[in-house]
Amino acid sequence: MTCKGFVTYIDRYASTTSIYVYVNCDERRGKIKVPNAINSLLEYAENYRINIIPVRGGPVKIKLNSFENAFEIFSLSQKSSFIIDFTAYIKKYFYPIIFDTNIIKGYNNVFRIKDARTTFTRSKELTGILALHSDESKNFELIDVRFLRSLIKGKNIDCIDVAAYPPNTIVRAIDNDVQIVQYPSTIRGKIRLQEKVIGCAVFNYSNLLALHTESNSVKIYSRREKNWIKRHDFAFKEEIRDIRWSILMGSLNLIIDFPERLDAYNLRGDRTSINLGPHLSARLSPLGNRIAVAYTDKIDIIDTVTGDVVFEKNLENVRIMEWTPYGDYLALCNQNACYIYSDLTQEIVVGKVFRSTISSVWWSPRTLSLYLVTSSSINIWFFDPYLITNKNLVTRLSIVE
C-alpha cells in the first residue's frame, strides 16, 4: 500500500457509527487497506457516507474498492494528509471490532500529533477530547483527536480532568474555584472552596468529584440535581501523589497513592489501606484485580485477591504507568523508554526507546492507541492492523463509558 493510515477515533450513536481515519500519502495516487473497524461496520450497514477533511495538500478524492478491500486515493498534490470520516447507518446500537488479544504485537508506529512547548505531566482522553496539563507551569491544552487539532490552550489552570458523560465534560480548577464545563461553554456546575485546589478527579459520569487541596486534604462531592454536595473531607499528613476513581472489591472507590501505601475510600467513607512499602508509583487496574507497583529497581504486578505477585521484572525508575480500560495491558514508562505488559500472558510484549523525556501516557478507550507525551511532542503510539495474526477477534465496550 502506498499510503499509511490509522483510526484516530470511533463515535457511536443510536443508529450511526462514525470512524475517523488519519491518512498520509507521498504520491498523487495511492491505496490503504480498509481498517478492520470499517470492515465490521460494512457487514451491518444499510448505507454509508464518506467525508474527507483536508489536513495538508490539495483536494483529495477516495473510492472504496470492495474487491481489493482498499480505499483508492486520488490527490492533486504530491504529498497529502487528510481525515476520512466514514459514517455507517445501522438499525442497532453497534460497536465495531477493532482489536484482539494479539493486536499488541503490532505496536510499532508512532505518529507525532504536534510539537509541545510545555512538558505536560498529565493526559487523559474521553469522548474525543484529549486534555493535557502541566503540574509545574499550570499550562493546559485540549485536542480534538478525531481531526488531531488543537481546540484551546491556556495558562493558570491548577488541575483539569475529563468525563465520559455528558460528552465533552471537563472539570477545571483555578485557585479555589472549580467549574464543571461541557465544552465549549456550557457550565454544568460550580464549587467554591476556602482553599486552593491542586488536584481533581471526576468520575466518568460527572456525578462524583474528588478535589485535592493545598492543605493536603481530599474532599469528595456528589451531584444532586444541579447542586454539588460535599460528602466527605479527609485530611492527611503524608504526601498525596495521585487521586483517581476505580473499582475495588466490586464497588466504586477513590484511590489515593501515598509514598508507602494505597488508600481506597468507598462512597460511605470506609477506608481500605494497602501497604506497598516505599515506591515510585502505584496503579490499581480498572477492575480492581491487579495493582502495579514501581520500585526504584523493579516492577511488581500484585493480585489484589490473593496478594500474590503474579509478575516481577527488573525495570529501573518507572514513574509513569497506565492500564488499558479493561486491565488487559499496562504501559510502563521510565524517562526514555516505554514497555507494554500483557496481563493475558503475564509478560512484557513490546518495548520502545524514545529520544525525548516521557512525561505522561494515556490509552484511548475507543481505539486502544497509546497517547504518549514527551518533553518536546504529543504523539500517538498505534498498532499496525496488518500485523495482526490472531483472527479470533474480541469486542469490548470500554468500562470507562
Image (spheres, rainbow, N blue to C red):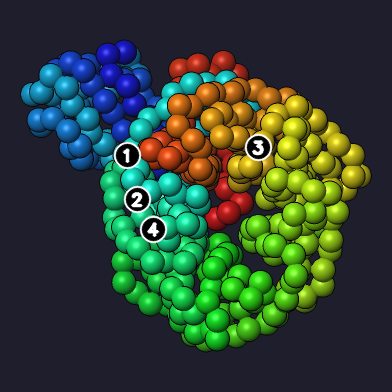
Task: State the residue in front, 336 or 4.
Answer: 336
For residue 318, which numbered disc appears in the image? 3
The residue indicated by pointer 2 is 143
Instruction: Name which residue type carries label 4.
Output: Asn
Please name the amino acid that badge 1 sits on.
Asp
Residue 356 appears anywhere in the view: yes
> Element under label 4?
loop
Q: CA distance from mark 1 to mark 2?
A: 13 Å
**Quarter of the image with the N terminus in it:** top left
Q: Residues within 10 Å of mark 2 (few under 14, many from 20)?
A: some
- The reply to whether callout 3 and callout 4 are in contact (CB within 8 Å) is no
Cα distance in 3D space between marks 4 and 1? 15 Å
The numbered mark, 3 or 4, whose residue comes first in the sequence reads 4
Quadrant of res 137: bottom left
Residue 15's spot in the image, x, y percent? 39, 52
Q: Amino acid at mark 2?
A: Ile
* Residue 41 can be seen in this image: no
Q: In the image, which disc is placed on residue 139?
A: 4
